[in-house]
Image (tube, rainbow, N blue to C red):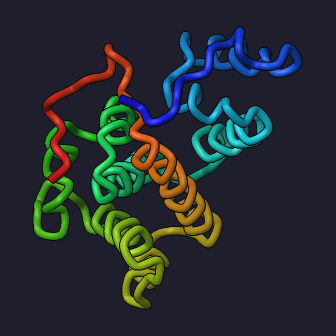
Amino acid sequence: MARLPYVTQEQLPESERDLFDDLLERFGRVNNIFRVIAHSPPILRRLLPLGAALRHATQLDPVLRELAILTVGRLAQCTYEVVHHSAFAQRLGVRPDQIERLAASESDPAFTAQERAVIRYAAEATQQVTVSTETLEALRSFLSTEHIVELVCNVAFYNMVVRVLVPLEVDLEEDAHDSRYKLT
């Protein structure tokens, strides 16, 4: 059970209720993460466009982006993030076997060298913040400077997201559960 109550649209100040209208239009519902962050409507209002820009206004290969996000979620032991992004990732071309074997990506033949480099970057940035020269050079071998910045910003953003979800114990929506994805 979440450590903070979920905000309803009626609980929002009248001037902020459009936030939920926009979410309903985009996603067909207001997910629990947004209902918790809605305790501070100004933060939610500014967070949503950044998240949308990272997902829809970048040139980074979406498969690489989702592998990085899943790595962040797995390392933070954030079931909410892993389940939600497993669904996104599959729609974008990440194979279910890759999601299931993400923890073994360094040696697993299901991953390309490029995918391994992105996963390694996400792991280092999540666990140590500092990233090795070798890891950055591996990214430079196939990503443009623009793509590296987009990767870095996605990993940073989703590290922030899991640091909201995990401490506040935000619940998965009832229809979002997928027991196939373990946090190992």
Residue at the (38%, 81%) spot, across then down: 135
Comparing 96 with 27, the one in front is 27
Quadrant for residue 15, please give it. top right
The residue lying furthest to the right in this view is 15
Q: Identify whether 48 is placed above or below 9.
A: below
Residue at the (62%, 35%) spot, across then down: 37
Residue 21 placement, left or right of 26: right
Q: Position of residue 133 (x, y in %)?
A: 43, 90
Comparing 95 with 44, the one in front is 44
Comparing 97 with 140, the one in front is 97
Q: Position of residue 125 (x, y in %)?
A: 44, 72
Q: Identify whether 144 is placed above or below 57.
A: below
Image mark count:
0
Q: Position of residue 30 (x, y in %)?
A: 56, 18
Residue at the (59%, 61%) spot, across then down: 153
Q: Identify whether 98 is placed above or below 128.
A: above
Q: Position of residue 91 (x, y in %)?
A: 37, 28
Check the picture and name the quadrant holding the N terminus: top left
The residue lying furthest to the bottom in this view is 133
Residue at the (31%, 34%) spot, across then down: 83
Residue 15 placement, left or right of 127: right
Q: Identify whether 54 is placed above or below 108.
A: above
